[in-house]
Image (tube, rainbow, N blue to C red):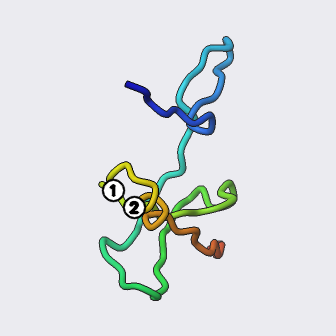
Amino acid sequence: MEIYKPAYLFTLDGSGNIVLAVRPTITSAPSTTTYGSAFTVQTPDAADIASVVMIKAGATLTLLIWINGWWALTLLRVFKR
């Protein structure tokens, strides 16, 4: 069995040990949306996020299904004062 562990999920702690990296916190997101509609995901970590993707969960391990289950999303940062 092979387990994929992308480098961005990990970082080094002060002692040089590999540990899980800090992930953004989602504070609000819709449970459903419709094709072509805009939706909002709120996070206090917006300033640190460079890109956003949506992945279809539960896809089988075929290339065709994988490609159809990955969408790059437009990132619009709105900062509240």
Which residue is outermost to the top? 15
> Looking at the image, is 30 positioned above or below residue 53?
below
SS at badge 1: loop
Looking at the image, which is closer to me, 37 or 40? 37
Which of marks 2 and 1 precedes in the sequence?
1
Q: Answer yes or no: do the residues labelled 1 and 2 have beta carbons within 8 Å?
A: yes
- Residue displayed at 52% across by 68% down: 71
Which residue lies under the disc numbered 1? 59
x and y percent of residue 4 in the render? Answer: 49, 34
Location of the C terminus by quadrant is: bottom right
Mark number, residue 79 = none
> Looking at the image, is 50 positioned above or below residue 3?
below
Q: Which marked residue is nearer to the observer: mark 1 or mark 2?
A: 2
- Callout 2 crowding tier (Cα within 10 Å): few <14, some 14–19, many ≥20: few
Specify the quadrant of the image occupied by residue 34: bottom left
Location of the N terminus by quadrant is: top left
> Looking at the image, is 4 positioned above or below residue 51?
above
Amino acid type, label 1: Ala
x and y percent of residue 33 in the render? Answer: 36, 80
Amino acid type, label 2: Ile
Whether residue 30 is visible here, answered yes or no, is yes
Whether residue 81 is visible here, answered yes or no, is no
Specify the quadrant of the image occupied by residue 22: top right
SS at badge 2: helix
x and y percent of residue 24 in the render? Answer: 54, 50
- Residue displayed at 50% across by 67% down: 42
Q: CA distance from mark 1 to mark 2?
A: 6 Å
Looking at the image, which is closer to me, 55 or 69? 69
- Residue displayed at 37% across by 49% down: 61
x and y percent of residue 72 in the render? Answer: 58, 68
> Looking at the image, is 21 positioned above or below residue 50?
above
Which residue lies under the disc numbered 2? 65
